[in-house]
Amino acid sequence: MKIIEKRKYTFLFSLILVVISLFFLGKWGLKLGIDFTGGILTEIQFSQEVKKNQINEIVADLKLNSLSIQPTEDNSFMIKYQSKENKINPELENKIKEKYPESEVLRTEFISSLVSSELKRNTIYAIILSIFGITWYIAWAFRKISYPINSWKYGFGAILALVHDIIIVLGVFAFLGEFQGVEVGIPFVASLLTIFGYSVNDTIVIFDRIRENLLHYGASKDFEGTINKSIKESIARSINTSLTLMFVLLAIIFFGGETIKYFSVALLIGVFFGTYSSIFVATAFIVELWKMSFKKGR
C-alpha cells in the first residue's frame, strides 16, 4: 500500500480542519486567563460538598469580570476573576464565609497587568525562538542529503506540520473558551511548547528513516517510493509511541483533577495530530516539493 499516494485527501482534510480552527480563532479568540490579563485567584476549601452553581449564586452580586470557578479536589474550588482592586477579594471571602462558616481560604494570588504583559511578550519570544531553533536543527541534521531536495526543505516541512498542529489546538480551545468557559494561561503555553517538541520529534523519526534510506540506496528518481518505504518502516513505532502517551493523558483527563485537565486535553490533541501531520503533512509536503522541482528539470 502506498500511503503517500493518499496525500491529496489528507491535504484536503487538514485544510478543512485548519480553516475551521482559524474561523473559531477569528470569531471568538482565546479566552485569556488572569495569567495574561491580570487579576485575583483565590482557592477555597469547603467542609461539605458544594456545587459550582452554588458558589456562583453567592458571588453574583459582586459582578466580577471574567469570573471562573473551577473545582480542584477535596471539596476545593479555584475562583479567578479580573480586578485591579484588592478590597474586592475580602468581600468575596466574607460572602462565602457567611454561607459556609467552616470554609477555609487555602491561597490568594494577585497578578498585576504589568506581569501579565511581560508573560505575553515572553510567550511570543519563546514560540518564535522554538520555531527558528527547530528549523535550524533539521536543516543541519539533513545537510548531507541535499539531493533530491535541499535540506532546508525538510525543516520547512516540519514547521508546516507544527503550525498545522498548533492552529488546530488553538481552534479547539477557542471553541471550548466560547462554550465551556475554558481559559488559557501558563499551563496552556507549557502544553503548546511540549507539543512543539513532540510534533517535531515524531516528524524527525520518519525523516531520519528517509535519510537512512537515501544514504543506503542512494538518491534516485523514485523519491516517492523511498518516502513510502520509510513511512511503512517507521509508522508502527510512531503510532505505538503516541498511543502509549495518549492512554496516559486520557487517564489524567478523567482521573487527574480539574487543575491539569485542560493541560492534558491540549497535549492529547497535539499528540494525535502531531502523529498524523508527521506522515500526512510534513512528509507529504516534501514529496510535493520534490515533484515540483523534478518537473522543472532539477
Image (cartoon, rainbow, N blue to C red):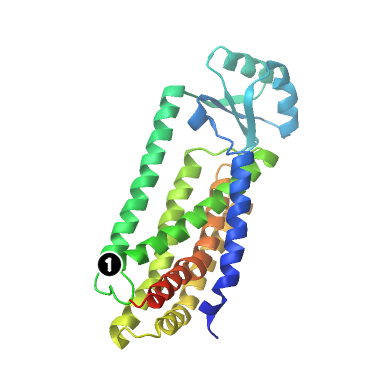
Helix, strand or loop at disc 1? helix
Q: Residues within 10 Å of mark 1 (few under 14, many from 20)?
A: some
Residue 197 found in image quarter = bottom left
Left or right: 69 as drawn, with respect to 266: right
Q: Quadrant of the C terminus?
A: bottom left
Q: Nearer the viewer, residue 261 or 128?
A: 128
Q: Quadrant of the N terminus?
A: bottom right
Task: Return the x and y of residue 265 as percentages of the image width and height.
Answer: 58, 51
Decide if residue 255 is in sight here: no
Residue found at the far front of this picture:
296
Q: Nearer the viewer, residue 167 or 173?
A: 167
What residue do we see at 53% from left, 83% from top? 2
Amino acid carrying mark 1 in the image: Ala
Task: Return the x and y of residue 208 as percentages of the image width and height.
Answer: 35, 73
Residue found at the far bottom of this picture:
217
Left or right: 166 as drawn, with respect to 149: right
Residue 93 found in image quarter = top right
Residue that badge 1 annotates: 141
- Up the image or down, 106 lies above or below 268; here it is above
What residue do we see at 58% from left, 55% from top? 18
Residue 289 found in image quarter = bottom left
What residue do we see at 43% from left, 54% from top? 196
Q: How many marks?
A: 1
- Up the image or down, 69 lies above or below 284; here it is above
Decide if residue 228 is in sight here: yes
What residue do we see at 62% from left, 27% from top? 66
- Up the image or down, 296 lies above or below 181; here it is below
Task: Return the x and y of residue 291 as percentages of the image width and height.
Answer: 43, 75
